[in-house]
Amino acid sequence: MKTKLFTTFLLQCSVCMFLQAQSLQIYYDDKVVTEGQVITINKIIEDVFADPFKPEMKGPFYVKNITGQDVNVMIKKPELISALAPNAKEGFCWAMCYDESPTTEDGIPVTITPGETTAVGKYASYKPEFGSSGSTSIKYTFYVENNPNDKVSIIYKFSYNEGSGIKQTKKSQDFNIFSQNGNLKVNYNLSNIKNIESSKIEIFSITGLKMKSEKITGLQETTVKISDLPKGFYVCSLVVNGKSIASGKFIIHK
């Protein structure tokens, strides 16, 4: 009887060890991510073909197979640690790409060969509303197909535009911008605004960083030097009495 119980105990332990076996590791910045570790992402992807008014942030998925055989790896439905910001979207690319995460699991595994790590092109995607500010934390879990206990996870905290001060602006038919010989010419109409205490042109990078702020005196046009700015997407904002009343976007190619 004792021998039978001992054998049963060994079998249960073997099953337990199998279920808890660690086949995967997940990396960020060439370092192994520990369970519960939070990685902060605060950079906007700058793509010359993208709309600068639709920013996107990405967190890479570098999952490594540390076994001696092929493993099929699934991704669970992303878990929101904190609520999405208003009008923000979260998605991912694993076996397939989703602009918004599906309501159920992806259901399609990615095969990783022994000792290999998933290649570029697999990532978490977060798309905040332009001009918004705040952060959202999302947990992504990967597991071996048919063995959900053999898993690794990473938490990405997407922090967008915190403290930058840029606000959502509106477009106006009386506001136009165009580049000319390393300068940005700005046309506007302030003749209908009474009691102007201050007026200025502000230029922001796509990440919300204020690059320039210049006072204006004329009611219809001004010129701002932009030849000293690096290439990329920018937003030009017309600010009157401390409030942005119009904006336009432009690209610097070098």
Image (cartoon, grey):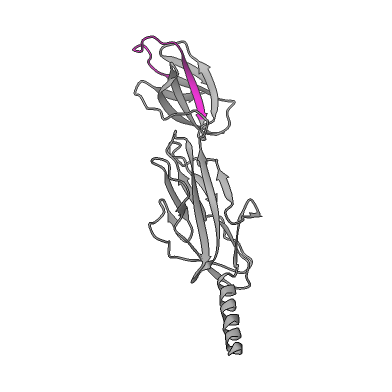
Q: Position of residue 120 (x, y in %)?
A: 56, 55
Q: Observer-nearest residue: 61 or 121? A: 61
**Left or right: 73 with respect to 99?**
right
Q: Quadrant of the C terminus?
A: top right
Span shown in magenta:
187-204
Q: Position of residue 148 (x, y in %)?
A: 50, 67
Q: Quadrant of the N terminus?
A: bottom right
Please say if 137 is above or below 65.
above
Q: Quadrant of residue 227?
A: top right
Residue drawn at (42%, 21%), measured in percent from left and top? Answer: 243
**Magenta stretch, overall SS:** loop
Residue 181 seen in render? no
Please say if 195 is above or below 91.
above
Q: Position of residue 160 (x, y in %)?
A: 50, 38
Residue 145 seen in render? yes
**Left or right: 137 with respect to 103?**
right
Is residue 72 inside the magenta stretch?
A: no
Instruction: Spot the residue most to the top.
Output: 195
Q: Observer-nearest residue: 101 or 137? A: 137
Residue drawn at (60%, 67%), measured in percent from left and top? Answer: 22
Instruction: Spot the residue most to the front.
Output: 1
Q: Position of residue 20 (x, y in %)?
A: 57, 69
Is residue 194 inside the magenta stretch?
A: yes
